[in-house]
Amino acid sequence: MVRLPSIDSLYVFAVAARHLSFTAAAAELHRTQSAVSHRIKALEAEIGARLFERSARGLELTAPGRALARQVDQAISDISRTLAELSRAAEPRHLRITLLPSVASRWLMPRLPRFLERHADIEVQVIADARVLDLRTERIDLAIRFGHGRYRGHVATLLMGDRVLPVCAPQLVARRSAIATIDALLELPLLHDSGAEGDGSLSDWHSWLDQLGRPAAPHRAGQRFSHAGLAIEAAVLGLGVTLARLSLVTDYLASGALICPLALSTATAFSYHLVALPEVAGLPEVMLFSNWLRTEARHTAAVVEQIGHEEERLRVTLNLPAASVCRN
């Protein structure tokens, strides 16, 4: 029987193979880069094959390295899944989910009671954090990410796309004539989500104006807030008009707390994705909650699509480009 290397050596190799970087692997493993390098060299000597080679593009796996990485990844995934199932069997059913604070407060929380009414036996812990938390380190079951959908080493599925449009409280424009043009809209006090400026999501005023063919229109002045939820709350309080993702304001629009003074929306470059570790994605409660989230997302997506159809006539009137579609 072939003598197996230590589990620790194989795990260090698997992390290094996933990152294709000893430095990144060391950071994840909380070890030094030198320790990782020595462990890989010892493993290569033990099995009698080179696992990595350096090229102009950086660190790459050799053919034996690729073969071993596939098998070790599968083995780690199987072991992790079994341990997760054993752990959960001894505990009450629970879920830990992480997402942006704005999405947590403006989209998930208003809908969560519907899930808990049906599944009172599942404890849901919501972790609202603007940081991209490590799901394995933080023992998190599921994440809702707003991004391009490329999450290496994770299972990611599309939840829904989004659009942005200007919204404000009814009282802000109650004594004004109808807002019929972009210039008229920009005369209102503008509210800014500074977190969206330059993040590539196309959720800020400049991106909105650029997609409407008005990149040079003045839009810099106004109050600034660190994330979308605060900017939306400021709009509800009548402080100005903010550019909001439709997913975060559909409930406000339905209740009349917010209105759309100029019904022009543009697509975001990012979409919402459900993200989980491979060993967790198939667990019953994770699948149950994911399926429920998709059902809720379909209702929101229908509203987003309806808004897009309703604005077509206005775009023709203002001689603007046709409505853009979500990039994902």
Image (cartoon, rainbow, N blue to C red):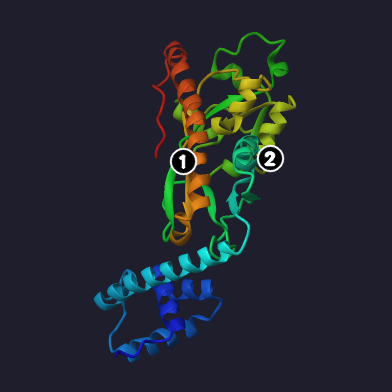
Q: CA distance from mark 1 to mark 2?
A: 26 Å
Q: Position of residue 234 (x, y in %)?
A: 72, 31
Q: Which mark is residue 261?
A: none
Amino acid on which disc 1 is placed: Leu
For residue 205, say whether it is visible.
no
Q: Which mark is residue 225?
A: 2
Q: Position of residue 317 (x, y in %)?
A: 45, 10
Relative depth, front residue between 64 and 131: 64
Which secondary structure lies at badge 2? strand
Q: Position of residue 56 (x, y in %)?
A: 30, 71
Residue most extreme to the top: 177
Residue in view at x 54 percent, y 60 percent? 135
Q: Disc 1 or disc 2, which is closer to the eye?
A: 1
Residue in view at x 31 percent, y 76 percent? 68
Q: Is residue 76 above or below residue 317?
A: below
Q: Is residue 85 left or right of residue 185?
A: left
Quarter of the figure with the N terminus: bottom left
Which secondary structure lies at badge 1? strand
Amino acid on which disc 2 is placed: Phe
Q: Is residue 122 above or below residue 216?
A: below
Residue behind mark 1: 159
| Crowding near the residue tagged with mark 1, few <14, some 14–19, many ≥20 C-alpha atoms within 10 Å | many
- Lower position in the chain sequence, tag 1 or tag 2: 1
